[in-house]
Amino acid sequence: MGDQMPCAALSNVWNKVKPFLAIISLQFGYAGMYIISLVSLKHGMSNFILCTYRHVVATIIIAPFAFVLERKIRPKMTLPIFLRIVVLGLLEPVLDQNLYYLGMMKTTATYSSAFVNMLPAVTFILAMIFRLEKINLKKIYSVAKIIGTAITVIGAMVMTLYKGPIVDFIKSGGVAHHGTTTESADKHWVTGTIMLLASILSWSSYFILQSFTLKMYPAELSLTAWICLMGTIENAVASLIMVRGISAWKLGWDSRLLAASYSGIVCSGIAYYVQGVVIRERGPVFLTSFSPLCMIITAALGTFVLSEQVHLGSILGAIIIVSGLYTVVWGKSKDGKSPESDEKSKGLQELPITNNAKSINVDESIDGDAKIVKIPASHRPFST
């Protein structure tokens, strides 16, 4: 008994610490992808070809697990589901990732990673449009989500419109910039920002459509494998159109192979699994709250590895965006929590739903806490 008590205590501690270690490791993985991808892109690799190879690797990694683990629960593929998968493959693997890489090349890895913190706010706006989020202005958590979204947008505007002086984290020799060079750089900066905003919008749209698709095809691994496969095909078509020459497809033992393998295995293979485990154990709010850590790690790596210049406007805008992010996260964490729902959930494990109920009725003839609650069927369709 004496030996079992320390083991049980260590096991409990490990179970509590495990989600934190997993999500922190994931942020390091994403930060590494930003740096490695930017290095390969600056060495001449096409972003379209990088996305193609990335999803080839991801499909090879994920497909066997999906085939084995979900063979008994995988629904039958239908034309409406397949068409949604085609659109999902276009939104995230093609539009989101290519626009992000293009925006990152025109700005910096640190600036681009800061924009990822806008994702919860943009997703929240789209969720309101498609009625996936309910807003009650009488509740403080709903007001917090709206205010947080507005703060996030203000932060993005600060990063875009105000560049400011360079903040030297590492002392370096001053480099004189001519006026024409600065004007050209500012033009690329605005273009890159627009691409990053389009990337975030595409990524948010992907999440919205994915939530609808999972209702029709509730097999996460299989759906991920299908999306990666469609992303491979669609990116290959885009690459053949946008990139000329067979030599662009060649991979050697260099940054190109590292970027494709690393992003495919770590950020599309391991990341999907880690995110699923963390969301199941701690919820999506916990997962989202760690995203600013990736920005900090990327900023540190970008300064040391790539000698990137960080401007004061980027720092101020990132602080504002993170403030808005945590305001949205706080509002989302309080969303739907009420004393009534908590009270009912204590005694009710499942609620049998009847399609012909006209009103909510409780069967009082059953003794004890568990009672059958009849809930009227919703007439709102779960489809776009």
Image (cartoon, grey):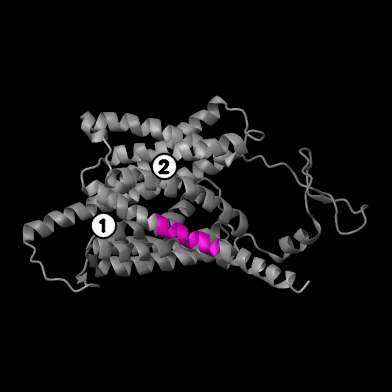
- Residue beneath disc 2: 92
Q: In which quarter of the image is residue 184?
A: bottom left
Q: Which amino acid does label 1 sit on?
A: Thr
Magenta segment range? 19-29
User: Is 27 inside the magenta-drawn segment?
Assistant: yes
Predominant secondary structure in magenta? Answer: helix
The numbered dot on residue 16 is: none
Looking at the image, which residue is at 61% across and 66% down?
14
Q: What element carries label 2?
A: helix
Direction from residue 181 to residue 109 in the image, left or right: right
Residue 322 visible in rendering = yes
x, y percentage for residue 56? 40, 36
User: Is 150 inside the magenta-drawn segment?
Assistant: no
Q: What residue type is labelled 2?
A: Glu
Looking at the image, which residue is at 78% across and 71% down?
1
Residue 151 visible in rendering = no
- Residue beneath disc 1: 108
Looking at the image, which residue is at 38% across and 50% down?
200
Q: Is mark 1 on a helix, strand or loop?
A: loop
